[in-house]
Image (tube, helix red, strand yellow):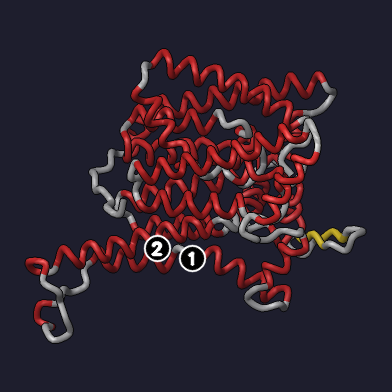
Amino acid sequence: MTDLETRVAPSRAGALRRAAPALLGYAAVRALGLVALAVWSAARDKNAYTLLTARWDSLWYTRVAELGYGYEVRLANGDVHSNLAFFPLLPWLERLVTAVSPLSYADGGFLVSLFASLAAAWGIFAVADHVYGRRAGVCAVLLWAVLPVGIVQSMAYSESLFTALAAWALYAVLTGRWPMAGALALLAGLTRPVGMAVVAAVWVAAIASFVRDRRGREPDGARITPSTPASAPLPSSADASRVLGMLLAPLGTAGYVLWVGHHTGKGPLGYLDVQAGWRNGFDGGYAFARFVGDKFTSFPSALAGVGLIVGVASVVWLYVIGVRQRQPLPLLVYTGVVTALALCASSYFGSKPRLLVPAFPLLLPLALAMSRARIRSSAAVLGSVAMTSAVYGAFWLNGSGPP
Protein backbone atom coordinates (compact mmCIF):
# COMPACT_ATOMS: atom_id res chain seq x y z
CA MET A 1 0.00 0.00 0.00
CA THR A 2 2.99 2.32 0.30
CA ASP A 3 4.62 1.74 -3.06
CA LEU A 4 3.79 4.25 -5.77
CA GLU A 5 4.10 2.62 -9.14
CA THR A 6 5.90 4.68 -11.78
CA ARG A 7 4.57 4.47 -15.32
CA VAL A 8 5.17 6.42 -18.46
CA ALA A 9 2.21 8.78 -18.71
CA PRO A 10 0.52 8.96 -22.11
CA SER A 11 0.45 12.21 -24.05
CA ARG A 12 -2.42 14.57 -23.36
CA ALA A 13 -4.16 13.66 -26.62
CA GLY A 14 -3.61 9.98 -25.97
CA ALA A 15 -4.89 10.30 -22.42
CA LEU A 16 -8.04 12.04 -23.65
CA ARG A 17 -8.68 9.32 -26.23
CA ARG A 18 -8.18 6.68 -23.57
CA ALA A 19 -10.64 8.44 -21.24
CA ALA A 20 -13.19 9.24 -23.97
CA PRO A 21 -15.59 6.32 -23.25
CA ALA A 22 -15.69 7.27 -19.57
CA LEU A 23 -16.26 10.96 -20.31
CA LEU A 24 -18.96 10.29 -22.89
CA GLY A 25 -20.71 7.91 -20.51
CA TYR A 26 -20.46 10.45 -17.72
CA ALA A 27 -21.90 13.21 -19.91
CA ALA A 28 -24.80 10.96 -20.92
CA VAL A 29 -25.65 10.13 -17.30
CA ARG A 30 -25.52 13.77 -16.25
CA ALA A 31 -27.64 14.79 -19.25
CA LEU A 32 -30.21 12.19 -18.23
CA GLY A 33 -30.27 13.63 -14.73
CA LEU A 34 -30.76 17.17 -16.00
CA VAL A 35 -33.58 16.12 -18.32
CA ALA A 36 -35.33 14.32 -15.46
CA LEU A 37 -34.90 17.42 -13.29
CA ALA A 38 -36.32 19.68 -15.99
CA VAL A 39 -39.38 17.47 -16.49
CA TRP A 40 -40.04 17.02 -12.77
CA SER A 41 -39.55 20.73 -12.06
CA ALA A 42 -41.87 21.75 -14.90
CA ALA A 43 -44.55 19.43 -13.53
CA ARG A 44 -44.26 21.19 -10.16
CA ASP A 45 -44.12 24.66 -11.73
CA LYS A 46 -40.52 25.22 -10.61
CA ASN A 47 -37.47 26.43 -12.51
CA ALA A 48 -34.86 23.68 -12.79
CA TYR A 49 -32.05 26.14 -13.47
CA THR A 50 -32.90 28.09 -10.32
CA LEU A 51 -32.72 24.86 -8.33
CA LEU A 52 -29.23 24.27 -9.70
CA THR A 53 -27.85 27.78 -9.28
CA ALA A 54 -29.78 29.85 -6.74
CA ARG A 55 -30.61 27.82 -3.65
CA TRP A 56 -28.82 26.82 -0.46
CA ASP A 57 -25.01 27.05 -0.70
CA SER A 58 -25.16 28.33 -4.28
CA LEU A 59 -26.55 31.61 -2.95
CA TRP A 60 -23.80 31.90 -0.37
CA TYR A 61 -21.10 31.39 -3.00
CA THR A 62 -22.60 34.02 -5.30
CA ARG A 63 -22.83 36.47 -2.42
CA VAL A 64 -19.13 35.99 -1.73
CA ALA A 65 -18.40 36.57 -5.41
CA GLU A 66 -20.57 39.70 -5.53
CA LEU A 67 -20.11 41.27 -2.10
CA GLY A 68 -16.89 39.77 -0.79
CA TYR A 69 -16.55 38.45 2.73
CA GLY A 70 -18.34 39.96 5.71
CA TYR A 71 -21.97 39.13 4.90
CA GLU A 72 -23.80 37.33 7.69
CA VAL A 73 -27.30 36.40 8.79
CA ARG A 74 -28.29 36.54 12.46
CA LEU A 75 -31.01 34.07 13.37
CA ALA A 76 -33.63 34.45 16.07
CA ASN A 77 -31.96 31.75 18.20
CA GLY A 78 -28.70 33.71 18.28
CA ASP A 79 -26.83 31.73 15.63
CA VAL A 80 -24.72 33.75 13.21
CA HIS A 81 -24.38 32.40 9.68
CA SER A 82 -21.31 34.06 8.17
CA ASN A 83 -20.15 33.67 4.58
CA LEU A 84 -16.63 33.25 5.96
CA ALA A 85 -17.56 29.58 6.29
CA PHE A 86 -17.31 29.23 2.50
CA PHE A 87 -13.85 28.84 1.00
CA PRO A 88 -12.92 31.28 -1.78
CA LEU A 89 -11.86 29.41 -4.92
CA LEU A 90 -15.34 28.86 -6.39
CA PRO A 91 -16.41 32.52 -5.79
CA TRP A 92 -13.14 33.70 -7.33
CA LEU A 93 -13.86 31.64 -10.44
CA GLU A 94 -17.45 32.91 -10.55
CA ARG A 95 -16.12 36.45 -10.40
CA LEU A 96 -13.63 35.66 -13.19
CA VAL A 97 -16.37 34.29 -15.46
CA THR A 98 -18.48 37.39 -14.85
CA ALA A 99 -15.52 39.68 -15.55
CA VAL A 100 -14.82 38.17 -18.99
CA SER A 101 -18.42 37.47 -20.09
CA PRO A 102 -21.97 38.82 -19.77
CA LEU A 103 -22.91 35.93 -17.49
CA SER A 104 -24.11 36.40 -13.92
CA TYR A 105 -22.33 35.04 -10.87
CA ALA A 106 -24.86 32.20 -10.68
CA ASP A 107 -24.27 31.41 -14.35
CA GLY A 108 -20.55 31.42 -13.65
CA GLY A 109 -21.01 28.94 -10.81
CA PHE A 110 -22.99 26.60 -13.05
CA LEU A 111 -20.41 26.89 -15.83
CA VAL A 112 -17.52 26.18 -13.46
CA SER A 113 -19.32 23.14 -12.05
CA LEU A 114 -20.10 21.89 -15.56
CA PHE A 115 -16.47 21.89 -16.64
CA ALA A 116 -15.20 20.86 -13.22
CA SER A 117 -17.46 17.80 -13.20
CA LEU A 118 -15.96 16.66 -16.52
CA ALA A 119 -12.46 17.32 -15.15
CA ALA A 120 -13.38 15.33 -12.04
CA ALA A 121 -14.65 12.43 -14.16
CA TRP A 122 -11.40 12.46 -16.13
CA GLY A 123 -9.36 12.57 -12.92
CA ILE A 124 -11.29 9.67 -11.41
CA PHE A 125 -10.72 7.70 -14.61
CA ALA A 126 -6.99 8.51 -14.53
CA VAL A 127 -6.65 7.27 -10.94
CA ALA A 128 -8.69 4.11 -11.44
CA ASP A 129 -7.03 3.36 -14.79
CA HIS A 130 -3.59 3.75 -13.20
CA VAL A 131 -4.44 1.39 -10.34
CA TYR A 132 -6.74 -1.19 -11.95
CA GLY A 133 -6.87 -0.61 -15.70
CA ARG A 134 -9.06 1.07 -18.28
CA ARG A 135 -12.28 -0.90 -17.81
CA ALA A 136 -12.20 -0.28 -14.07
CA GLY A 137 -11.60 3.41 -14.81
CA VAL A 138 -14.71 3.61 -16.99
CA CYS A 139 -16.77 1.78 -14.37
CA ALA A 140 -15.50 4.06 -11.59
CA VAL A 141 -16.54 7.18 -13.49
CA LEU A 142 -19.99 5.80 -14.28
CA LEU A 143 -20.51 4.71 -10.69
CA TRP A 144 -19.61 8.22 -9.53
CA ALA A 145 -22.05 9.66 -12.08
CA VAL A 146 -24.96 7.50 -10.90
CA LEU A 147 -24.62 8.25 -7.20
CA PRO A 148 -28.09 8.89 -5.72
CA VAL A 149 -27.08 12.51 -5.04
CA GLY A 150 -25.13 12.81 -8.29
CA ILE A 151 -27.24 15.81 -9.30
CA VAL A 152 -25.01 17.85 -6.93
CA GLN A 153 -22.24 17.43 -9.50
CA SER A 154 -24.25 19.70 -11.81
CA MET A 155 -25.09 22.34 -9.21
CA ALA A 156 -23.26 25.62 -8.55
CA TYR A 157 -21.70 23.96 -5.53
CA SER A 158 -18.02 23.23 -4.86
CA GLU A 159 -18.21 19.40 -4.85
CA SER A 160 -17.29 18.97 -8.51
CA LEU A 161 -14.48 21.53 -8.37
CA PHE A 162 -13.03 19.97 -5.24
CA THR A 163 -13.30 16.42 -6.58
CA ALA A 164 -11.52 17.44 -9.79
CA LEU A 165 -8.63 19.01 -7.88
CA ALA A 166 -8.43 16.11 -5.42
CA ALA A 167 -8.52 13.40 -8.12
CA TRP A 168 -5.79 15.01 -10.19
CA ALA A 169 -3.70 15.68 -7.08
CA LEU A 170 -3.93 12.00 -6.18
CA TYR A 171 -3.02 11.03 -9.74
CA ALA A 172 0.00 13.34 -9.55
CA VAL A 173 1.07 11.61 -6.33
CA LEU A 174 0.62 8.16 -7.87
CA THR A 175 2.77 9.15 -10.85
CA GLY A 176 5.44 10.91 -8.78
CA ARG A 177 4.67 14.48 -9.87
CA TRP A 178 5.12 16.04 -6.46
CA PRO A 179 5.12 19.79 -7.27
CA MET A 180 1.93 19.34 -9.29
CA ALA A 181 0.39 17.33 -6.46
CA GLY A 182 1.29 20.07 -3.99
CA ALA A 183 -0.11 22.83 -6.21
CA LEU A 184 -3.39 20.98 -6.76
CA ALA A 185 -3.63 20.24 -3.02
CA LEU A 186 -3.15 23.96 -2.41
CA LEU A 187 -6.08 24.76 -4.71
CA ALA A 188 -8.21 22.01 -3.16
CA GLY A 189 -7.49 23.61 0.21
CA LEU A 190 -8.92 26.88 -1.10
CA THR A 191 -12.11 25.10 -2.17
CA ARG A 192 -13.44 23.23 0.87
CA PRO A 193 -12.37 22.59 4.49
CA VAL A 194 -11.93 18.92 3.58
CA GLY A 195 -8.97 20.02 1.48
CA MET A 196 -6.93 18.83 4.44
CA ALA A 197 -7.64 15.29 3.19
CA VAL A 198 -5.64 16.00 0.04
CA VAL A 199 -2.86 17.57 2.10
CA ALA A 200 -2.74 14.49 4.31
CA ALA A 201 -2.54 12.19 1.28
CA VAL A 202 0.36 14.18 -0.21
CA TRP A 203 2.28 14.31 3.05
CA VAL A 204 1.83 10.65 4.01
CA ALA A 205 2.71 9.46 0.50
CA ALA A 206 5.77 11.71 0.36
CA ILE A 207 7.03 10.54 3.76
CA ALA A 208 6.48 6.91 2.76
CA SER A 209 8.37 7.58 -0.46
CA PHE A 210 11.26 9.16 1.45
CA VAL A 211 11.48 6.13 3.74
CA ARG A 212 11.34 3.68 0.84
CA ASP A 213 14.01 5.52 -1.12
CA ARG A 214 16.31 5.81 1.88
CA ARG A 215 16.07 2.09 2.52
CA GLY A 216 16.86 1.47 -1.13
CA ARG A 217 20.00 3.61 -0.89
CA GLU A 218 21.41 1.78 2.11
CA PRO A 219 24.16 -0.62 0.96
CA ASP A 220 23.12 -4.25 1.48
CA GLY A 221 20.47 -3.10 3.92
CA ALA A 222 23.10 -1.77 6.35
CA ARG A 223 21.93 1.00 8.61
CA ILE A 224 23.46 4.40 7.88
CA THR A 225 24.53 6.21 11.06
CA PRO A 226 26.10 9.59 11.77
CA SER A 227 29.43 7.83 12.34
CA THR A 228 29.57 6.83 8.67
CA PRO A 229 29.09 10.13 6.79
CA ALA A 230 30.87 8.92 3.69
CA SER A 231 28.11 6.42 2.96
CA ALA A 232 25.22 8.79 3.63
CA PRO A 233 23.18 9.52 0.48
CA LEU A 234 23.14 13.03 -0.89
CA PRO A 235 19.77 14.72 -1.43
CA SER A 236 18.48 14.03 -4.93
CA SER A 237 16.30 16.07 -7.25
CA ALA A 238 13.48 13.66 -6.37
CA ASP A 239 13.90 14.60 -2.70
CA ALA A 240 13.69 18.30 -3.56
CA SER A 241 10.61 17.66 -5.69
CA ARG A 242 8.85 15.86 -2.84
CA VAL A 243 9.77 18.58 -0.35
CA LEU A 244 8.40 21.25 -2.69
CA GLY A 245 5.14 19.32 -3.03
CA MET A 246 4.87 18.95 0.73
CA LEU A 247 5.50 22.67 1.27
CA LEU A 248 2.91 23.74 -1.29
CA ALA A 249 0.15 21.33 -0.23
CA PRO A 250 -1.06 22.94 3.03
CA LEU A 251 -0.80 26.58 1.92
CA GLY A 252 -4.39 26.81 0.64
CA THR A 253 -6.15 25.47 3.73
CA ALA A 254 -3.78 27.08 6.21
CA GLY A 255 -3.75 30.39 4.37
CA TYR A 256 -7.54 30.78 4.33
CA VAL A 257 -8.04 29.56 7.90
CA LEU A 258 -5.37 31.93 9.22
CA TRP A 259 -6.81 34.79 7.17
CA VAL A 260 -10.26 34.18 8.69
CA GLY A 261 -8.72 34.20 12.16
CA HIS A 262 -7.00 37.49 11.42
CA HIS A 263 -10.11 38.97 9.78
CA THR A 264 -12.32 38.10 12.75
CA GLY A 265 -9.67 39.01 15.32
CA LYS A 266 -10.04 35.61 16.99
CA GLY A 267 -6.64 34.19 16.17
CA PRO A 268 -5.64 30.97 14.39
CA LEU A 269 -8.78 29.12 15.53
CA GLY A 270 -11.19 31.83 14.43
CA TYR A 271 -12.52 29.66 11.62
CA LEU A 272 -13.83 27.19 14.22
CA ASP A 273 -15.88 30.02 15.73
CA VAL A 274 -17.32 30.76 12.30
CA GLN A 275 -18.35 27.11 11.95
CA ALA A 276 -19.78 27.15 15.46
CA GLY A 277 -22.07 29.95 14.33
CA TRP A 278 -23.53 27.44 11.90
CA ARG A 279 -23.71 24.86 14.73
CA ASN A 280 -21.20 22.81 12.82
CA GLY A 281 -18.17 21.03 14.22
CA PHE A 282 -16.49 17.67 14.71
CA ASP A 283 -17.65 15.51 17.61
CA GLY A 284 -16.52 12.05 16.52
CA GLY A 285 -19.99 11.12 15.31
CA TYR A 286 -21.80 11.47 18.64
CA ALA A 287 -24.49 13.84 17.39
CA PHE A 288 -25.05 11.76 14.26
CA ALA A 289 -25.41 8.59 16.35
CA ARG A 290 -28.03 10.34 18.48
CA PHE A 291 -29.79 11.52 15.33
CA VAL A 292 -29.94 7.93 14.03
CA GLY A 293 -31.05 6.60 17.41
CA ASP A 294 -33.93 9.08 17.59
CA LYS A 295 -35.30 7.58 14.37
CA PHE A 296 -36.16 4.40 16.27
CA THR A 297 -38.57 6.11 18.63
CA SER A 298 -41.45 5.83 16.18
CA PHE A 299 -42.62 4.14 13.01
CA PRO A 300 -42.14 4.59 10.05
CA SER A 301 -39.14 6.80 10.91
CA ALA A 302 -37.47 3.62 12.18
CA LEU A 303 -37.18 2.55 8.54
CA ALA A 304 -35.13 5.68 7.88
CA GLY A 305 -32.94 4.75 10.84
CA VAL A 306 -32.33 1.32 9.39
CA GLY A 307 -31.48 2.90 6.03
CA LEU A 308 -28.96 5.24 7.67
CA ILE A 309 -27.28 2.37 9.48
CA VAL A 310 -27.08 0.35 6.28
CA GLY A 311 -25.66 3.36 4.44
CA VAL A 312 -22.93 3.99 7.02
CA ALA A 313 -22.12 0.28 7.22
CA SER A 314 -21.81 0.17 3.41
CA VAL A 315 -19.37 3.09 3.41
CA VAL A 316 -17.23 1.45 6.10
CA TRP A 317 -17.40 -1.91 4.29
CA LEU A 318 -16.22 -0.38 1.02
CA TYR A 319 -13.33 1.29 2.81
CA VAL A 320 -12.31 -1.97 4.48
CA ILE A 321 -12.40 -3.75 1.12
CA GLY A 322 -10.17 -1.03 -0.31
CA VAL A 323 -7.68 -1.72 2.47
CA ARG A 324 -7.82 -5.46 1.83
CA GLN A 325 -7.32 -4.92 -1.88
CA ARG A 326 -4.22 -2.88 -1.03
CA GLN A 327 -5.26 0.37 -2.61
CA PRO A 328 -2.34 2.80 -2.80
CA LEU A 329 -1.67 4.54 0.50
CA PRO A 330 -2.57 8.09 -0.67
CA LEU A 331 -6.03 6.91 -1.76
CA LEU A 332 -6.65 5.25 1.60
CA VAL A 333 -5.50 8.31 3.54
CA TYR A 334 -7.58 10.70 1.42
CA THR A 335 -10.71 8.55 1.60
CA GLY A 336 -10.33 7.96 5.32
CA VAL A 337 -10.13 11.67 6.12
CA VAL A 338 -13.02 12.63 3.79
CA THR A 339 -15.21 9.88 5.23
CA ALA A 340 -14.35 10.68 8.84
CA LEU A 341 -15.07 14.39 8.40
CA ALA A 342 -18.37 13.65 6.65
CA LEU A 343 -19.68 11.09 9.12
CA CYS A 344 -18.41 12.76 12.28
CA ALA A 345 -19.66 16.31 11.64
CA SER A 346 -22.00 17.41 14.42
CA SER A 347 -24.84 18.85 12.31
CA TYR A 348 -26.43 19.02 8.86
CA PHE A 349 -27.04 15.29 8.82
CA GLY A 350 -28.98 15.51 5.58
CA SER A 351 -25.83 16.78 3.90
CA LYS A 352 -23.75 13.70 4.64
CA PRO A 353 -24.43 11.94 1.30
CA ARG A 354 -23.35 15.13 -0.48
CA LEU A 355 -20.23 15.44 1.66
CA LEU A 356 -19.24 11.90 0.64
CA VAL A 357 -19.40 12.69 -3.09
CA PRO A 358 -15.65 13.52 -3.23
CA ALA A 359 -14.77 10.15 -1.61
CA PHE A 360 -14.64 8.47 -5.03
CA PRO A 361 -12.01 5.82 -4.06
CA LEU A 362 -14.80 4.13 -2.08
CA LEU A 363 -16.22 3.14 -5.48
CA LEU A 364 -13.06 1.42 -6.69
CA PRO A 365 -13.88 -2.03 -5.24
CA LEU A 366 -17.25 -1.94 -7.02
CA ALA A 367 -15.62 -0.66 -10.20
CA LEU A 368 -13.08 -3.47 -10.12
CA ALA A 369 -15.81 -6.07 -9.66
CA MET A 370 -17.88 -4.61 -12.51
CA SER A 371 -14.85 -4.48 -14.81
CA ARG A 372 -14.48 -8.24 -14.39
CA ALA A 373 -18.14 -8.95 -15.13
CA ARG A 374 -19.70 -9.30 -18.55
CA ILE A 375 -20.17 -6.00 -20.35
CA ARG A 376 -23.89 -6.62 -20.89
CA SER A 377 -24.43 -7.30 -17.21
CA SER A 378 -22.51 -4.22 -16.13
CA ALA A 379 -24.30 -2.05 -18.69
CA ALA A 380 -27.71 -3.29 -17.55
CA VAL A 381 -26.94 -2.58 -13.90
CA LEU A 382 -25.50 0.86 -14.60
CA GLY A 383 -28.39 1.78 -16.91
CA SER A 384 -30.98 0.83 -14.30
CA VAL A 385 -29.14 2.68 -11.55
CA ALA A 386 -28.72 5.75 -13.80
CA MET A 387 -32.48 5.93 -14.38
CA THR A 388 -33.18 5.55 -10.67
CA SER A 389 -30.56 8.16 -9.79
CA ALA A 390 -31.99 10.64 -12.31
CA VAL A 391 -35.50 10.31 -10.92
CA TYR A 392 -34.31 10.46 -7.31
CA GLY A 393 -32.15 13.50 -8.02
CA ALA A 394 -35.12 15.35 -9.54
CA PHE A 395 -37.33 14.39 -6.60
CA TRP A 396 -34.67 15.30 -4.04
CA LEU A 397 -33.78 18.68 -5.53
CA ASN A 398 -37.46 19.64 -5.80
CA GLY A 399 -37.89 18.65 -2.17
CA SER A 400 -35.50 18.83 0.76
CA GLY A 401 -32.42 19.02 -1.45
CA PRO A 402 -28.84 19.42 -0.19
CA PRO A 403 -28.84 21.87 2.74
Residue 59 in view, yes or no:
yes
Give the label on residue 250, or none.
Answer: 1
Tell me the element at label 2.
Answer: helix
Tell which of 302 and 33 is nearer to you: 302
Residue 54 in view, yes or no:
no
**Earlier-in-chain disc, 1 versus 2:** 2
Q: Is residue 282 above or below residue 301?
A: below
Asked if disc 1 and disc 2 are in contact, CB closer than 8 Å, the reply is: yes
On the image, the x and y values in percent for residue 212 come to 23, 62
The residue under the point 66% across, 35% down is 306
Q: Which-is-in-front pick, marks 1 and 2?
A: 2
| Three-letter amino acid code at the position of disc 2 | Trp
Tell which of 188 and 360 is nearer to you: 360
The residue under the point 57% across, 59% down is 190
Q: Is residue 244 above or below residue 36?
A: below
Q: Quadrant of the C terminus?
A: top right
Label 2, on which residue? 203
Q: Is residue 263 above or below residue 400?
A: below
Q: Residue furthest front?
A: 297
- Residue 376 figure quarter: top left
Horizontal arrangement in the rendering, residue 72 relative to residue 84 (left or right): right
In three-dimensional space, the C-alpha distance between marks 1 and 2, rounded to whole angstroms, equals 9 Å
The residue under the point 42% across, 60% down is 182
Q: Residues within 10 Å of mark 1 (few under 14, many from 20)?
A: many
